[in-house]
C-alpha cells in the first residue's frame, strides 16, 4: 500500500507536467507585474556593525514575498549579493555571504487548499547555490492562486494580506570579519554558469518566470534587501537614504551545451609509490603513417571504428584519424560525424582503408561521408587502417586541459541515419569509440606537453568501453595502472589503452611516464542509484522525477550528465516518467519485499543487470 500510494502520487505529478502546454492564461491586472520582495523583519534594509561581525558570523532570516502576482505557474530564480563576485570557474563568491538554509514557508502565499508547498509539482530550494525553482501543480488548468483569499488568481501590494504569507525563507549568513560597505541581496538577471555543469558539458541558465499555457517569460520586478555594514570606528551618526529601483526584465531560459572542458591534473609520483595494480601491456605497433593503433587490443572483437585521440595547442589545426578494426566486409556507408561546435571543421581527407572515391561534406554538423564499392562487392579494411582524416581548428582562447569530443552521429540534421552496409545491403552492427582533442600547453622547448585525452569518465553500463591515450609521450615508456581491477579491465599498448567496465564502481586509471602520473578518474555506481547512496530507494525516484519536471518544463536539467545517465534505467537516452516508475518498482520488489527480480526483468533494457549475455 505504501508503494502504491507513493507511485500514484509521483506519477500524478509527472503526468501533470505534460499538461502545462495547454493551460489557459489567467487575466492579468494591467498595473501588476510579478514582484519579489526581500525582507528582514518586515523591512527591505537592515544595518549591522563591524564590531558585531568581529565576534562571529551573523545570521539573517530573509523572507521572500510575492507582493504582486498577475498569474504565475513556474518560477526559477538565481540570487546573488551585489554582482555575485563571479569567480574564474564560473562560481559565485558573493563577498563571502552564503545561505545555509532555504525552504518554502508553510503556509505559503499559494494554493487555497491549505498553502502547502509540497503540493507543488516541483519545489526545489538549493541554499548553498542560492537557487530556487518552483512549478505549481494543485490545479493544472490555472495559475497558482492566493492562499490568503480562496480563488484569488492575481493580487498586488495594495491588498491587506500581500505580506502575510511569504513564498520562501532563507538563512542568510554574513561572515565574520565582513568589511564595511553596502551589500544588496537580489535576483541575478544575467546568464550564469549552472553548477550542474560537468567538466564535459557547460550549461548556462537564467532567472525566469512563466504563466500557465504561455511560452513567453513573464516580466518581473524585485525589491532587493539592502544590508549596510557600518564601520564601528566611525563615531559620527549618519543617515543613509536608500533608493530602491525596480527593473522589468523579460527573460527566456536558455540551455547551451556547446563548450566542453575537462580539468587537467598531473600528479608527480613514481611507479613504485603508486598504490595500484599493474595492467597487462603489449608491444606498441606503429603504422607507416606514424599513428599508433589499437591493433593488439581489438583482435577478435567487434567491427569497430575508433576515432583517434589528438592534442593541440590553442588555435592549432589538428588531423584526427578514424581507425577501422575487424571489418567483416563492407560495400558502402552513409556516415555522419558529430563534433563539438566550438571546433571549426576545415576539411576531410581520405585514409588508406578503401581505395575508392568518397563524398565528403565538412560544412555541416554532423558532417557527412558517403561511399560505395561501385560493383557492390565487399571490401575489407585491414586492422588499423584509416577510414578518413578529420581536420579541426581549436579555438584560440581554448584553455589548457579543455577537451572536444568527436564521435559518430546517430543521424544527420535532416534525419538520415548512419548506416554501414554489406554487399547484400544489410546494415551491420558497428561499435564506435569516440575521440577527443585535448588542449595542451607548449613546453619550454616549444613542443606540446604530455596529457591524457580524458581526465574523468563515467560508465553507466557494464561492458562499456573507453579509449585512453597519453598524448605527446614521444619515445618514452608508458606504464599503465588501475586502482580497482575489479571495476575496470585495462589493455594497453604503448601510450594507448582500452578500458572496459567490469562493475559499476569507482576506479583510477593511471599512465606513468618519466615518473609523472597522469590520472583518469573512472566513475560508476549501482544501476539506478542516482544519488550514489549505495542503494536504490524512493529518493532516487524523486531525483528522476525532479529531472523530468525541470527539463520538460523549464528546459533546465536538474541532474548532472553522469546522474542523468544513471537515472535513465530504461536505456532510451532520456529521463522520463517510465524511469521513475521502474525505479519505484525495483525499490518495492527488491528492497521492500525482497523479491528476486533483476533490472532487466523490470525494464527490458538489454544493457541492464540481469540481461542475457
Image (spheres, grey):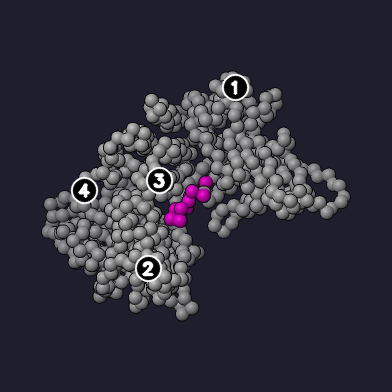
Q: If the image is split into quadrants, where does the N terminus sit?
A: top left
Where does the magenta region start and end?
A: 195-205
Q: Which residue is mark 4?
A: 613
| Element type at mark 2 | strand
Q: Is residue 127 above or below residue 363?
A: above
* Residue 550 at x, y percent in the picture: 47, 39
Choose top left, top right, bottom left or bottom right for residue 15: top left
Q: Earlier in the sequence, mark 2 or mark 4?
A: 2
Q: Earlier in the sequence, mark 1 or mark 3?
A: 1
Q: In percent of the image, x 47 and y 61: which residue is there? A: 263
Q: Earlier in the sequence, mark 2 or mark 3?
A: 2
Pick whichever, 275 or 542, lies toward us.
275
Report the Cα–Cα distance between label 4 and label 3. Answer: 25 Å
Q: Which residue is mark 3?
A: 534
Pick whichever, 318 or 229, lies toward us.
229
Mark 4 neighbour class, 10 Å CA radius: few under 14, some 14 to 19, many 20 or more: few
Report the Cα–Cα distance between label 2 and label 3. Answer: 29 Å
Choose top left, top right, bottom left or bottom right for residue 43: top right
Q: Which residue is mark 2?
A: 511
Q: In percent of the image, x 28 and y 37: which residue is there? A: 596
* Residue 481 at x, y percent in the picture: 35, 66
Asked if the stretch drawn in magenta spans residue 204, the answer is: yes
Pick whichever, 348 or 205, lies toward us.
205
| Element type at mark 1 | loop
| Element type at mark 4 | loop
Q: Which residue is mark 1?
A: 152
Amino acid at each position: 500500500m505504501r508503494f502504491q500510494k507513493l507511485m500514484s502520487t509521483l506519477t500524478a505529478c509527472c503526468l501533470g507536467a505534460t499538461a502545462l502546454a495547454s493551460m489557459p492564461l489567467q487575466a492579468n491586472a494591467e498595473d501588476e507585474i510579478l514582484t519579489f520582495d526581500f525582507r528582514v523583519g518586515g523591512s527591505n534594509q537592515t544595518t549591522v556593525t563591524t564590531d558585531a561581525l568581529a565576534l562571529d558570523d551573523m545570521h539573517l532570516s530573509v523572507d521572500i514575498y510575492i507582493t504582486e502576482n498577475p498569474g504565475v505557474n513556474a518560477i526559477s530564480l538565481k540570487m546573488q549579493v551585489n554582482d555575485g563576485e563571479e569567480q574564474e570557474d564560473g562560481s559565485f563568491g558573493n563577498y563571502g555571504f552564503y545561505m545555509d538554509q532555504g525552504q518554502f514557508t508553510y503556509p505559503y502565499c499559494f494554493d487555497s487548499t491549505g498553502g502547502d508547498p509540497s503540493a507543488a509539482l516541483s519545489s526545489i530550494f538549493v541554499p548553498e547555490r542560492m537557487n530556487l525553482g518552483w512549478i505549481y501543480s494543485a490545479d493544472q488548468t490555472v495559475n497558482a492562486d492566493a492562499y490568503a483569499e480562496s480563488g484569488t488568481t492575481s493580487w498586488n501590494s495594495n491588498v491587506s494580506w500581500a505580506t502575510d504569507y511569504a513564498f520562501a525563507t532563507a538563512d542568510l549568513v554574513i561572515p565574520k570579519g565582513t568589511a564595511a560597505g553596502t551589500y544588496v541581496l537580489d535576483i541575478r538577471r544575467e546568464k550564469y554558469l549552472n553548477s550542474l555543469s560537468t567538466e564535459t558539458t557547460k550549461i548556462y541558465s537564467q532567472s525566469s518566470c512563466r504563466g500557465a499555457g504561455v511560452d513567453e517569460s513573464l516580466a518581473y520586478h524585485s525589491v532587493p534587501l539592502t544590508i549596510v555594514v557600518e564601520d564601528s570606528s566611525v563615531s559620527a551618526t549618519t543617515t543613509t537614504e536608500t533608493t530602491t529601483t525596480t527593473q522589468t526584465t523579460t527573460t527566456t531560459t536558455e540551455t547551451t551545451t556547446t563548450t566542453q572542458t575537462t580539468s587537467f591534473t598531473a600528479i608527480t609520483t613514481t611507479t613504485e609509490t603508486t598504490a595500484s595494480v599493474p595492467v597487462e601491456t603489449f608491444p606498441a605497433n606503429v603504422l607507416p603513417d606514424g599513428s599508433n593503433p589499437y591493433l593488439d587490443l581489438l583482435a577478435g572483437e567487434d567491427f569497430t571504428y575508433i576515432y583517434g585521440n589528438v592534442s593541440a595547442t590553442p588555435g592549432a589545426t589538428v588531423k584526427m584519424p578514424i581507425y577501422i578494426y575487424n571489418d567483416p566486409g563492407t560495400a558502402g556507408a552513409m556516415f555522419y560525424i558529430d563534433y563539438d561546435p566550438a571546433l571549426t571543421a576545415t576539411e576531410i581527407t581520405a585514409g588508406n582503408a578503401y581505395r575508392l572515391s568518397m563524398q565528403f561534406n565538412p560544412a555541416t554538423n554532423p558532417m557527412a561521408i558517403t561511399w560505395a564499392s561501385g560493383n557492390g562487392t565487399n571490401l575489407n579494411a585491414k586492422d588499423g587502417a584509416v577510414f578518413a582524416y578529420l581536420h579541426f581548428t581549436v579555438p584560440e582562447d581554448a584553455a589548457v586541459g579543455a577537451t572536444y569530443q568527436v564521435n559518430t552521429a546517430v543521424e544527420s540534421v535532416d534525419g538520415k541515419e548512419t548506416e554501414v552496409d554489406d554487399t547484400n545491403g544489410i546494415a551491420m552492427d558497428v561499435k564506435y569509440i569516440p575521440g577527443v582533442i585535448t588542449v595542451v600547453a607548449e613546453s619550454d622547448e616549444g613542443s606540446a606537453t604530455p596529457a591524457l585525452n580524458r581526465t574523468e569518465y563515467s560508465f553507466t553500463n557494464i561492458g562499456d568501453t573507453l579509449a585512453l591515450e597519453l598524448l605527446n609521450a614521444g619515445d618514452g615508456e608508458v606504464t599503465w595502472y588501475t586502482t580497482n581491477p575489479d571495476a575496470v579491465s585495462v589493455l594497453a599498448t604503448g601510450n594507448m589503452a582500452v578500458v572496459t567496465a567490469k562493475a559499476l564502481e569507482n576506479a583510477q586509471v593511471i599512465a606513468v611516464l618519466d615518473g609523472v602520473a597522469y590520472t583518469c578518474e573512472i566513475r560508476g555506481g549501482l544501476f539506478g542509484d542516482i544519488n550514489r547512496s549505495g542503494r536504490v530507494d524512493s529518493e532516487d525516484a524523486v531525483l528522476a522525477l525532479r529531472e523530468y519536471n525541470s527539463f520538460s518544463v523549464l528546459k533546465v536539467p536538474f541532474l548532472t550528465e553522469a546522474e542523468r545517465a544513471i537515472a535513465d534505467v530504461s536505456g532510451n537516452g532520456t529521463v522520463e516518467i517510465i524511469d521513475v516508475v521502474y525505479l519505484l518498482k525495483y525499490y518495492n520488489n527488491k528492497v521492500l519485499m525482497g523479491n528476486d527480480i533483476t533490472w532487466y526483468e523490470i525494464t527490458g533494457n538489454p544493457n541492464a543487470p540481469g540481461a542475457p549475455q
